[in-house]
Amino acid sequence: MDQSMKNLFAPAGSAALITGGTSGLGHAIAEAFLQNGVDVAVCSRHPDSAPELAALAEREGRRYLAVFCDVTKEDSVAAMLDEVEAAFGPVLLVVNSAGRNILKPAEDYDAASFAAVMDLNMMGTHLVSKGAAKRWMIPAGKGRIVNLSSAKAFLCADRNYAAYCASKGAVAMYTQQLGCEWARFGITVNAIAPTFVRTPINAKQLDDPAYYRKVVGHIPMGRLGEGRDIAAAALFLCSEGAGFITGTTLKVDGGCTGLQ
Ligand SMILES: NC(=O)c1ccc[n+]([C@@H]2O[C@H](COP(=O)([O-])OP(=O)(O)OC[C@H]3O[C@@H](n4cnc5c(N)ncnc54)[C@H](OP(=O)(O)O)[C@@H]3O)[C@@H](O)[C@H]2O)c1
């Protein structure tokens, strides 16, 4: 053994771009990065909705930038990447956390709703990944991309999840493809598959006590996930030591995808 085991979990870049970093899991990941030595740019359609991240960055002595972006639109992504680059230079850590769900029974799932879910969860992930890779990571010969898939890429619900499950299954396979395709550029591409973490995406569902009991009852660990659980996985996948892990989808689900 000749390699040092020191700093195995040091971040593999000095700055991160987090889509959907203003809310929920992206927000938790932004907090974790800021508290672990990484400058953070977040983007969403309401970039000023998380002023507490700017305050945290100031306390931590890190740079923070919040930029408008609709990640489903290629020109909006290009403008956002321009703005991030002007402030931070090339960014080698990217987390795609912007996502949504629309709950409808499959037999009533109209084309517009289905397309809206696929557009954000899948196409948004692609547009930001390819933009960041082409501008920053491929020229640098390194980079880390982390996508938010879901336990729903592996588990079904009894109703309402046709588009969401399809989109998150697509994210997992897309991640695997990019992991293979961009290995030659030194870029790792991985995904995280969380079970339920209470955020605005699911707060209404979890407010129903019967639904909440059903969800928790299906998680062997006996609790919902927390932002911290997901942030830890993102930090790990963006660490120096994770450089040989690519194309994988890391389940952070308290064991629920294994339970029959
Ligand atoms: N929470 C969970 O239990 C859970 C479980 C498994 C997987 N996930 C996945 O984790 C990711 C984050 O979910 P979350 O729970 O953090 O949801 P959330 O709290 O609703 O956050 C979603 C974020 O995406 C942004 N966003 C929405 N549309 C956008 C667009 N067109 N362009 C750019 N940003 C956009 C939102 O900001 P604006 O509205 O201001 O644009 C917000 O910052 C999603 O992909 C979700 O599917 C979540």
Image (cartoon, rainbow, N blue to C red):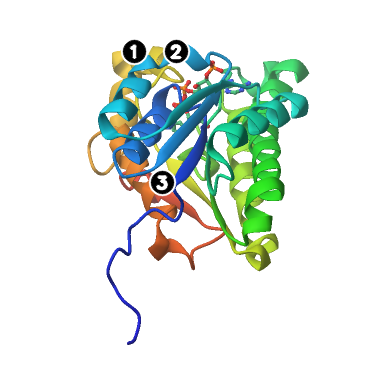
Q: Earlier in the sequence, mark 3 or mark 1?
A: 1
On the image, the x and y values in percent for residue 162 come to 62, 29
| SS at mark 3 in the image | helix
Of residues 224 and 245, the one nearer the viewer is 245
Q: Amino acid at mark 1?
A: Asp
Residue named by callout 3? 234
| Ligand 1 under 8 Å from disc 2 Cβ | yes
Of residues 114 and 260, the one nearer the viewer is 114
Question: Badge 1, how many Cα within 10 Å: few under 14, some, many 20+?
Answer: few
Asked if one can make out residue 225 in the rendered structure from this viewpoint, the answer is: no
On the image, the x and y values in percent for residue 250 come to 44, 52
Q: Which mark is residue 49?
A: 2
Q: Earlier in the sequence, mark 2 or mark 3?
A: 2
On the image, the x and y values in percent for residue 225 come to 31, 35
Rounded to the nearest angstrom, the CA distance separating label 1 from label 2 is 27 Å
| Ligand 1 under 8 Å from disc 1 Cβ | no
Up the image or down, 2 lies above or below 145; here it is: below
At x 70%, y 61%, the residue is: 181
Q: Amino acid at mark 2?
A: Ser
Q: Amino acid at mark 3?
A: Ala
| Residue 65 left/right relative to 239 | right
Q: Nearer the viewer, mark 1 or mark 2?
A: 2
Residue named by callout 1? 208
